């Protein structure tokens, strides 16, 4: 409610019904909490960046994957700041520049879903994926595929040994 003196005398009271606005805000906040809770249940390190390159959302697996303490992450960080925190595990600045271009480029071809692999300095092999979102944001996910690749290599070695024994 707003009140002010009326020019002809008396008091003018203005009332505004904010019920719809408050309900919408509560539903929006609930939706954000559901998204955050859902992302936190994933094993993949997931982060979402706006088209301006600012970090909008990340899950707890992201912090674990990159060995980042939650208090090192400011409320609003851009991609370059996040990449600096991740550099100790993936030293290639070219990789981070290319990934940033996928996040911030407005060209639909550059924003197409992409994936690749990168070696992590602690011996892990990571698969990365980018996925454009309808609102112009981009989801970036990292998965530890070290065990999968080791298993594939063991199966290939076994198959090769079997073929060699059959040939002999």
Image: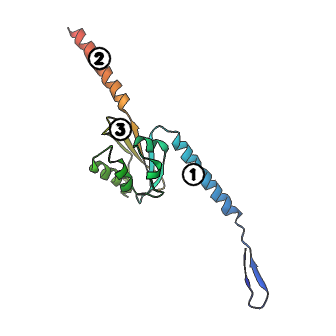
In depth, the one of 113 and 46 nearer the eye is: 46
- Tell me the distance, in whole angstroms, between the alpha carbons under discs 2 and 1: 48 Å
**Can residue 164 be seen from the camera position used here?**
yes
> What residue does disc 3 label?
126
- For mark 3, give the secondary structure: strand
Q: Which mark is residue 32?
A: 1
Residue under the point 32% across and 48% down: 87
Q: Quadrant of residue 101?
A: bottom left
**Can residue 109 be seen from the camera position used here?**
no
In depth, the one of 129 and 74 nearer the eye is: 74
Q: Quadrant of the C terminus?
A: top left
Where is residue 12 shown, x and y percent of the image? 76, 82
- For mark 1, give the secondary structure: helix
Which of discs 3 and 2 lies nearer the camera? The answer is 3
Q: Quadrant of the N terminus?
A: bottom right
Looking at the image, is 32 positioned above or below residue 52?
above
Where is residue 63 shown, x and y percent of the image? 44, 45
Residue under the point 78% across and 90% down: 9
Which of discs 2 and 1 lies nearer the camera? The answer is 1
> What residue does disc 2 label?
159
- Tell me the distance, in whole angstroms, between the alpha carbons under discs 3 and 2: 25 Å
Horizontal side of residue 79 vs 158, given as left or right: right
Residue under the point 70% across and 66% down: 18
In depth, the one of 160 and 112 nearer the eye is: 160
Horizontal side of residue 77 vs 3, given as left or right: left
Horizontal side of residue 105 vs 41, given as left or right: left
Q: Residues within 10 Å of mark 1 (few under 14, many from 20)?
A: few
Mark closest to the chain's N terminus, 3 or 2: 3
Mark closest to the chain's N terminus, 2 or 1: 1
Q: Residues within 10 Å of mark 3 (few under 14, many from 20)?
A: some
């Amino acid at each position: 409610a707003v009140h002010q003196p009326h020019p002809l005398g008396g008091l003018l009271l203005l009332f505004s019904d904010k019920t719809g606005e408050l309900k919408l805000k509560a539903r929006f906040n609930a939706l954000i909490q559901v998204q955050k809770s859902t992302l936190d249940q994933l094993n993949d390190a997931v982060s979402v960046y706006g088209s301006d390159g600012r970090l909008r959302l990340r899950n707890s697996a992201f912090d674990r994957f990159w060995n980042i303490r939650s208090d090192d992450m400011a409320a609003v960080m851009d991609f370059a700041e996040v990449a600096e925190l991740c550099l100790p595990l993936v030293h290639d600045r070219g990789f981070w520049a290319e990934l940033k271009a996928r996040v911030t480029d407005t060209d639909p071809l550059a924003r197409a879903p992409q994936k690749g692999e990168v070696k992590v300095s602690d011996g892990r092999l990571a698969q990365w994926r980018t996925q454009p979102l309808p609102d112009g944001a981009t989801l970036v996910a990292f998965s530890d595929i070290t065990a999968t690749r080791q298993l594939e290599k063991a199966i290939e070695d076994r198959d090769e040994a079997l073929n060699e024994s059959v040939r002999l």
